[in-house]
């Protein structure tokens, strides 16, 4: 089935939800465990993919996040006749901790410095970064764009929305679907998924600043509206 013909099939079959076709490459389909997972950068993305792909035999955990490009997704999955009955997972995250994590992670890398400019990895640098996002930088990269903009389907499409902050709940959910988490080295997967060591948990004092907090609320107001009930 060619992808051009897949568009109508997917849209008509999956409850006629609105689809952002640019994001379909970021939707993982696991027919064995009957799961659809919409990947969002900085939201335990690599972590969950490694668990899924490890069981499917597409990748060993050691191979890391490069495998996300090669796993089973909408553009390379042919047999979609039964996915209407699949569980549909979305992992969300507090926009404040997500953007801070993206900032501390990506602006350690030369690629990002060359493309977007240099920011000091401290309070002043993050404040300037937020001003840049508010100007025209927000949609320029998926790692700090609105979560609502990197989701392939309507929010109501998902049967299960789990906050990244509730990792125990996520582990239980995946285990109940058939992923043998008790047999996997979770610490190894987690370390591999977070090899960049943002240390954002140690920098939450930045988020306690009133100006910073208000700025994030303004920039990510659409996400906070979407995720009302998860994050106030």
Image: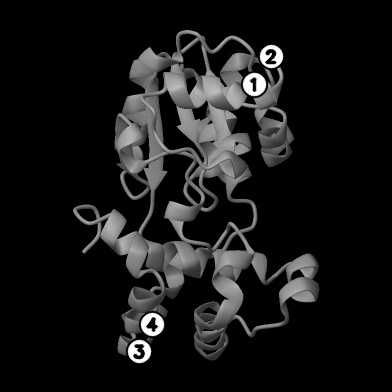
Mark 3 and mark 1: span between their CA atoms? 49 Å
Question: Which residue is identified by label 3?
Answer: 211
Q: Secondary structure at mark 4?
A: helix
The reply to whether callout 4 and callout 3 are in contact (CB within 8 Å) is yes
Mark found first going from the N terminus, 4 or 2: 2
Q: Is residue 230 left or right of residue 91?
A: left
- Mark 3, other Cα within 10 Å: few <14 / some 14–19 / many ≥20: few
User: Is residue 182 visible from the viewing direction of this image?
Assistant: no
Q: Position of residue 119 (x, y in %)?
A: 65, 83
Question: Which residue is identified by label 2?
Answer: 1
Q: In the displayed structure, would residue 44 be above or below residue 119? A: above
Look at discs 1 and 4 and give the one toward the viewer: 1
Q: In the displayed structure, would residue 137 be above or below residue 168? A: below
Look at discs 3 and 1 and give the one toward the viewer: 1
Mark found first going from the N terminus, 1 or 4: 1
Q: Secondary structure at mark 2?
A: loop
Mark 3 and mark 2: span between their CA atoms? 51 Å
Quarter of the rendering occupied by the C terminus: bottom left
Q: Secondary structure at mark 3?
A: helix
Residue 160 occupies quadrant: top left
Look at discs 3 and 2 and give the one toward the viewer: 2
Question: Which residue is identified by label 1?
Answer: 5
Identify the residue shown where x is 69% and y is 20%. Answer: 58
Query: Which numbered marker is on residue 80?
Result: none
Look at discs 4 and 2 and give the one toward the viewer: 2
Look at discs 2 and 1 and give the one toward the viewer: 1
The foreground one among 4 and 127 is 4
Q: In the displayed structure, would residue 48 be above or below residue 100? A: above
The reply to whether callout 1 and callout 4 are in contact (CB within 8 Å) is no
Question: Which residue is identified by label 4?
Answer: 215
Mark 4 and mark 3: span between their CA atoms? 6 Å
């Amino acid at each position: 089935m060619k992808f051009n013909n897949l568009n109508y099939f997917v849209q008509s079959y999956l409850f006629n939800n609105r689809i952002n076709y640019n994001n379909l490459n970021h939707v993982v389909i696991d027919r064995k465990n009957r799961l659809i997972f919409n990947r969002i950068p900085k939201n335990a993305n690599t972590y969950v993919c490694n668990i899924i792909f490890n069981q499917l035999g597409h990748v060993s955990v050691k191979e890391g996040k490069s495998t996300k490009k090669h796993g089973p997704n909408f553009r390379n999955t042919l047999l979609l006749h039964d996915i209407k009955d699949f569980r549909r997972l979305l992992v969300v995250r507090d926009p404040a901790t997500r953007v801070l994590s993206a900032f501390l992670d990506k602006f350690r890398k030369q690629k990002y410095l060359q493309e977007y400019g240099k920011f000091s990895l401290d309070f002043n640098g993050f404040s300037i970064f937020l001003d840049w996002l508010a100007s025209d930088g927000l949609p320029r990269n998926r790692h700090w764009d609105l979560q609502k903009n990197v989701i392939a389907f309507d929010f109501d499409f998902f049967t299960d929305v789990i906050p990244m902050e509730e990792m125990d709940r996520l582990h239980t959910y995946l285990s109940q679907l058939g992923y043998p988490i008790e047999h996997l080295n979770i610490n190894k997967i987690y370390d591999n998924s977070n090899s960049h060591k943002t240390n954002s948990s140690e920098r939450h004092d930045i988020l306690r600043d009133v100006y910073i907090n208000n700025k994030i609320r303004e920039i990510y107001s659409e996400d906070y509206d979407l995720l009302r009930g998860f994050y106030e």
